[in-house]
Each structure stands twice: as structure tokens, then as C-alpha cells.
Image (spheres, rainbow, N blue to C red):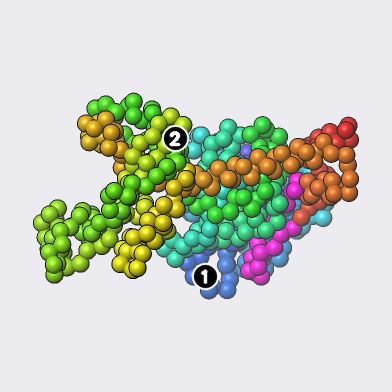
Amino acid sequence: MVHVKNGYVRICSIVSINRCLTQRCKIKVRVLRRWTFDSKDSQEKKKRFDVVLIDEQGNQIQAIVPKNHSNTFLNVLHEGHVYHIENFSVQTRTDSYCPVQHEYLILIRLHTIVRGSSEAHPEIPKYNFDFVEFNNISLLPKENQNLKDVYGTLEGLSELMFRKGLMLKEIFLKNSSGTELKINLWENAIQFMDNVITYATSVPVLVVTSLTVRSYYDKYFLNSTSATKIYVNLEILEVLELQNSSTFKERNISMLQTSSSVERNMKDRSLTNRKTLSQILQMLNEDSVGQVFTCKAIINDIVHDYASFYKSCTKISCRKKVIDKGDHYWCNNCNNAIPSADARYQLKARIQDDTESTLITIFGDEAEALLKHSASELEKLMESANGIQTVKAIIDKIIGTSIVFEIKISQYNIQSQGRYGFTANKVFQEDYKLHSHQIQEDIEQQLRLERSTDIPNPSNKKNRTDKTYKRKSYVVFSTEDSNESSQTSIIRPPSKRVRKIKENKARI
Ligand SMILES: [Zn+2]
């Protein structure tokens, strides 16, 4: 049975392929989203475009405007507007991914009647998202073909990267319980993000739509599609709730820049299994062989009794000490003659935290990253006048720095009970930056507190208008026909949060 109201068919009752055309079905719908279908030939002048339509009941259907007559409808069908559509075809879906959960889709034909309405039509929803909770993403079936929407606070974003000739930008969203999720934005979706960064003054809450679910080992992440849209600080219940939650912190957006997944993984790694030196020393038993810990300590001294670098085998998988044979070198590990050898660091340092002091050896690239000079550079310097003193001075510069060391417990560490120290698997200087970042946040927090208790003055008034501006909702979109991206701001009454701030100020 076909449900009809005021002569309009409900989207949920579009189930038959031919009946709609023969019976001249009419629908009254709002265009929720519009996107250009990514064709393989990007030079193609005419491109198919797609829309998601929603009716009064909140049911959605995808509609396709084929490339042959897409130009006819490009300036007719706009996002957010309500239309009367008549004389269309209905098809089964052929695309592998579905932006909406409807068995069929509408085909806009050249003779389809599309008539816009100038009224607001509050009875037809403006948004409808298929939100998936971050923690439930891993529960989705592997062959899930329904595109998902997510929302969260923007926690980080990477620089522009290139993967197999495609542009990629990673963004990280955080939900109300603090779980972080990575979204890979590809090609067209990146320009939405550029607009977010340009126009947002504080860290926004984003709604990102039409995403596919992927996993890499055990880590789940989402990928954008050509149907992906990004909405900023949208005034919908979910977003407002997140903005008003205790975990939501207002921060300056510039603090988010340049945190690629590599850097974020490093941050995670530098915080994994964090122990004090005394805890590590107490754990030295057979069970702990192979375990990896991180500890934060200050470099107290460099042990110069040992050479800070040695001649190493050039084979990447070897890097062992080689024997100088005059006209060539010999590697016992490879059992081979080596024509030339590399200088490689083996920096021995005394480190200390609040609980203990121990020795640590830092090899190769890890030491080079700390000293910011290559071993061969320092080796050459050694040969110059006062070379030994100069090199010693360069190395001693790192004394007093606070470093996070990653240590893997070896059999040797157990036998010696740590008396001869450890080997650094990896060193992280990022912790220092994290620390200063934290301080910066604390300072900002403090300043905000001070301002809010100040007697209102002209500069405070300015801050207040800034706040209101921050809370403005806006939608970023691209104008497909001009290939330029643009952004519109809809001025709305300040959200609850801003009103609350204003009320508090009024009371002072
Ligand atoms: Zn070797």
C-alpha cells in the first residue's frame, strides 16, 4: 500500500520500481546533502551529482542526477531547500556504499518536475544523522556498507599528506567519555577542514557524515567518501550536550595544528607503561625480560670514559662494531669485509628521576636526535684543533634535559640487576613539548578565570563578543560548479552555554 498525504507519497513507501513513474508519484522533500560523484575521469565536464532527500516523517532516500542532464538541475536543487518532485524513476541501488538506509533510489530524469518552495517548512527535518558511538564502531559488521556519521570535539589534525597520489588529512575527534577516533579525510573532504581551521576561533565540535569503517590491526578508523560533509558547532542536541559536558574544554584552535598520527602514536608510546626508575629496578626478574617500560628522567651527566661513537658495520640490520684492518674493516657479526665504516653513537649517560639514578646507553639515531649532530660530523670535528673539547662541549649540552626513555628489559639487565645500566630503545623529547603545552593551557585557563572575575571594562566587552562569535553555527560547503570553496555564516542566538556565561557575568 502506498501512503499518500495531501497527494504526496511517503519516502518509506517507495518500494516499487515502475509504479512511481506510471502513477506519477509526487514527493515533498528537503535536500539534506548534495555532492558530486567522484568519477574516474576528473577532467570530465559533466558530472553526476547526488542528493539525500528527507520527508516529513524523517525518512530518507538517495536521488541521482545523471551526468547527461546534471547541469539542468545543478542550479535548481540546493541543500536545505524544500522541493516538490514529480515524474521520477525508481531504481535498486548499484553503488557499493549507501549514504542512507533505503532499498531503492530515485533517478531524476530530464523530464522530472522539480519545483522549489519558498516557505521554511518546519515540519520537514533539517538534519538527520546516523550517528555511531565511537565504542560501537568495532562492533559493526565487517561488510557494513551503510555510511556512518560521527560527532566529536576536534582534538587534532595532521598536515596535508599524499598517499598513492591522493591527498590525505587525518583528523582526530574525541567523544564525551574521552575516547579518540581517527578520520582520514581524502581529496574533496579536506577543503571542509581547511574552512573549519580558517573560520573557527576555538576548538569546534564537528559532525562528519557519510564515512566508511576501516580497521588496521586492532585499530578502527573512518574514511571519508565523496558524500562526506563536515558541520561545525551545529545546533543539534548531541553537539550541544557535548559542548556542555564536563570534558569539553575551550581551547585555541592553533594549538591543534601539526599532530599527525605518527606524532600522536609517539605521544601514546611515550606514555605507555610509565614507571619510575626505582620501580623498574625492582622489577628485574626473569618474568620481566622483553617487557617495555617508559620512564621520565633528567640527564645528570655524560660518561666520557667510553668513546661516544664507534666504527659500525654499514649493514642496516647489523650496525655492530667493526675492526679496522688498515685498508678495510672487518665485521665479526656479518663475518665479512666492509670497505668503509660508519661512525655510530653509543652515548652513555647517567640519568635520574625522583626515585633513583642509573646509567643508560643511547645508540645511533636516537642519540643523533638528541644531539642534533650526526656521529660522522662529530668524528670529523674530533680531528680538528681542540676537537676533543669541542665535541665534549656539544655532547654535554644535553645535560640537564628531561627526557622520556623507552627501555626494553634484557636478560643482561636481569643478570646484572641493572648495575651497568640499560639501553634506550627510544628517546622522546616530545614530552617536554607536551609539558609546555600543558603549561600554556593552564595559563590560558588562569587568564580566563581572572577575566571573568574582573570588573567589566571595554576589553572585557570585546572578549564577550569573541565568545559569541565562537559559538556561531555555520555549515561549510563547496560550490561544485565553480570549484571554489565558500563558507556561510548563519547568525543565530547565542547557545545556552554563552547565555550561561553572560548570566554569570551579569550577576557579578
Ligand atoms: Zn655487520
The disc at residue 455 is: none
65 drawn magenta = no
The residue carrying mark 2 is 353
Q: Which residues fall within the magenta stretch?
A: 470-488
Relative to 336, is 300 above or below? Answer: above
Hey, which residue is sitting farthest front in the picture? 386
Question: Does residue 376 appear to the left or right of 148 in the view shown?
Answer: left
Q: Quadrant of the C terminus?
A: top right
First-in-chain label (2 vs 1): 1
| Mark 2 and mark 1: Cα distance apart in space | 58 Å
Q: Quadrant of the N terminus?
A: top right
Q: Position of residue 242 (x, y in %)?
A: 66, 36
Q: Position of residue 89 (x, y in %)?
A: 60, 56
The residue carrying mark 1 is 42
Question: Does residue 124 appear to the left or right of 322 in the view shown?
Answer: right
480 drawn magenta = yes
Residue at 20% over, 55% down: 321
What crowding class fits label 2: few (fewer than 14 Cα within 10 Å), some (14-19), or many (20 or more)? some
Q: Is the CB atom of the residue marked by disc 2 within 8 angstroms of ligand 1's nearest atom?
A: no
Snapshot quadrant of residue 149? top right
